[in-house]
Every structure is written in structure tokens, then in C-alpha cells.
Image: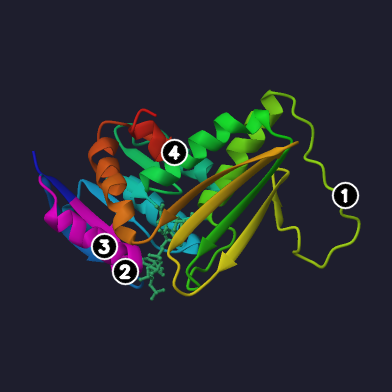
Amino acid sequence: MTLRVAVIGAAGRMGQQVVEAVERADGLELAGRFDVGDDLGDLGGADVAVEFTVPGATLANVLHCVEQGVHAVVGTTGWTDESMSQVRAALAVQPKVGVLIAPNFAIGAVLTMRFAAQAARFYESVEVIELHHPDKVDAPSGTAIRTAEVIAEARRSAAVPPAPDATTSALDGARGAQVDGVPVHAVRLRGLVAHEEVLFGSPGETLTIRHDSYDRASFMPGVLAGVRGVVDRPGLTVGLEEILDL
Ligand SMILES: NC(=O)C1=CN([C@@H]2O[C@H](COP(=O)(O)OP(=O)(O)OC[C@H]3O[C@@H](n4cnc5c(N)ncnc54)[C@H](OP(=O)(O)O)[C@@H]3O)[C@@H](O)[C@H]2O)C=CC1
Ligand SMILES: O=C(O)C1=N[C@H](C(=O)O)C[C@H](O)C1
């Protein structure tokens, strides 16, 4: 059966790549391209909508998809517990619809989060550095926030004490943003696409886990796996790892 796929944010950096990937993929057909100012309507009769827009627009777009009975695969950042609760409430009245929200569709980024969670309980110190192209509007990245959260969760479960830090005076921002107790640093640099480093340290050793997306092509296999997987997963799924059975 052919799945009809609409792309919301179709004129953007990710949206353009998704349009091409859908057009090239076996068993998928482009149902429509939507961008800012367009009426989403019935999403061109789509079965699945892929949403890559901006943090301020994504919730309304996803709620519209759910109301229309259209499954959604969402890569836009900025999701909170509160906005996810609104999606769950909308899905409760559309029990056949699935929504997948994933901060990162690159397999290496998903593995980085998984490996970081595994390593977290063995090290005293941890810091996350994310590095992106300078056109990115949010900081820190959704991926870095999620990475810090899974590390913090693993450290809490293992009763690891707070990381040592003797800093008593610092310029604003010098120690990064605290995400669930984990310092997260954001670099914006022309030439980059999307990159993340997780640094762990204990006496006498460090462990660095690094992932680099050099091209947005890196996200497409994950997006397509999400499109094919979401139709059989009613309700809200958070993270591509659920679809990949990681
Ligand atoms: N999960 C993942 O794997 C990845 C997630 N991302 C995330 O995806 C999002 C998009 O990134 P990127 O493609 O680089 O951003 P872009 O700014 O290139 O694209 C966003 C597009 O959405 C459009 N847009 C804005 N508001 C709306 C709206 N209400 N309805 C429909 N379209 C709208 C924008 O139009 P205009 O420019 O005119 O405002 C633009 O064309 C970001 O949150 C980013 O962090 C990015 C890469 C991978
Ligand atoms: O804006 C981007 O480019 C990216 N955004 C996502 C994020 O904020 O984590 C995913 C990836 O890092 C690329």
C-alpha cells in the first residue's frame, strides 16, 4: 500500500530534503507541500504529515494533523511536557492516530544518547557541547537537551553525586546552561551542520562520545523509518529509538 505524505515546513532546510526523500522513496507519494501562511486543510489527503517548522508553530500544526486524523512525524524542537500533554489529550479523541516526536532522526545521534545514558553512572563529571550552523534559532539544541536529560536520569538512578565544580566566579554563560544539572554549551559556526559531543571524566580518564551530521541527508533514513512506523503506532511516541527498537 502506498502512503501519502504531506510535508509541513516544506520550503525550509529540512522540509526541502524531506520532499525529495519522499519523492524518491518506494511506497511513499508526496501529498502536498505546506509552509508558513498556507492553510493546512485536509493536508492534501495525506496519511502522514512530516513537520519541520519552528518551535512556535509546531504544536498548532500537530494538533491540526491529529484533528484531521493524519499521523504526524515531527522533528521540530521546543517541545515541553506541557505541549506533549496537549498532543496526548488530542490523541485521546483520535485513538487510531499516531504522532512521533523525535529531537534527532540521525542514527548516530540516537546512538549517542543511548551510549551516553549507559556511560553516565560511571563518571564523576559530564558536560555536553552541541555545535550547529548559525541559522539555527534555538539554543541549546533539542538533541542536547534530551541528551542531558537522559544522562541526568541515569545519574539519579545510580545516586551519582553532582559533578565537582569549584567555580566561584564566572562570566555569564561561561559554564553553559544547566539542563537537569548537566552543563550544556552551544556553539554556532558557519560551515557546521549539526554536531554533539558528550564529555565524561573521572580521575585519570575521560570518555568523549561525538556525533557529526555533515549533511541533512543523515536525517532522511530516520524520517522515512518514522513515516513507515508511525502508522502502526497509535498514540504519542517520543524518540526514534522506539521505532528502531533500540
Ligand atoms: N529532529 C531532527 O532530526 C531535526 C530537527 N531539526 C529541527 O527542525 C526545525 C526546522 O529546522 P530547519 O529546516 O533547519 O529550519 P528552517 O527555518 O530552514 O525551516 C523551517 C520552515 O518552516 C516554515 N514555517 C514557519 N512557520 C510555519 C508554520 N506556522 N507553518 C508551516 N511552515 C512554517 C519556515 O518559513 P519561514 O522561514 O518563512 O519562517 C521555514 O520554511 C528546527 O526546530 C530544527 O531544530 C532540524 C534538523 C534535524
Ligand atoms: O536545527 C538543526 O539544524 C537541528 N536541530 C535539531 C536539534 O535542535 O536537536 C536536530 C539537529 O541537531 C539539527
- Residue 44 screen position, x and y as percent: 18, 58
Position of residue 123 relative to residue 2, above or below, is above
Ligand 1 sits in which quadrant? Answer: bottom left
Given this view, does label 4 or label 2 mark the residue nearer the observer? 4
Cα–Cα gap, marks 4 and 2: 31 Å
User: First in sequence: mark 1 or mark 3?
Assistant: 3
- Mark 1 residue type: Ala
Q: Does 8 appear in magenta?
A: yes
- Identified at 55% across, 51% down, the residue is 197
Quarter assignment of residue 154 = top right
Q: Mark 3 or mark 4, which is nearer the start of the sequence?
A: 3
Q: Nearer the viewer, mark 1 or mark 3?
A: 1
- SS class, disc 1: loop
Can I make out residue 79 in this image?
Answer: no
Kindly identify the residue that appears in the image at 40 percent across and 44 percent down. Answer: 108
* Magenta stretch, residue numbers: 5-26
**Could you tell which of marks 1 and 2 lies nearer the N-terminus?**
2
- Name the residue that disc number 3 marks: 17
The span from disc 2 to disc 3 (Cα, nearest Å) is 14 Å
Q: Secondary structure beneath disc 4? A: helix
The residue under label 2 is 35
N-term mark: 2 or 3: 3
Pointer 4 or 1: first along the chain: 4
Report if the CB atoms under discs 1 and 3 are less than 8 Å apart. no
Name the side, left or right, on which 118 lies relative to 51: right
Image disc number at residue 111: 4
Residue that sits furthest to the front in the current view: 204
Q: Earlier in the sequence, mark 4 or mark 2?
A: 2
- According to the picture, the residue beneath numbered tag 1 turns out to be 166
Give coordinates of residue 93: x percent, y percent.
38, 35
Q: Is residue 160 left or right of residue 62?
A: right
Some atom of ligand 1 lies within 8 Å of the CB belonging to the residue at label 2:
yes
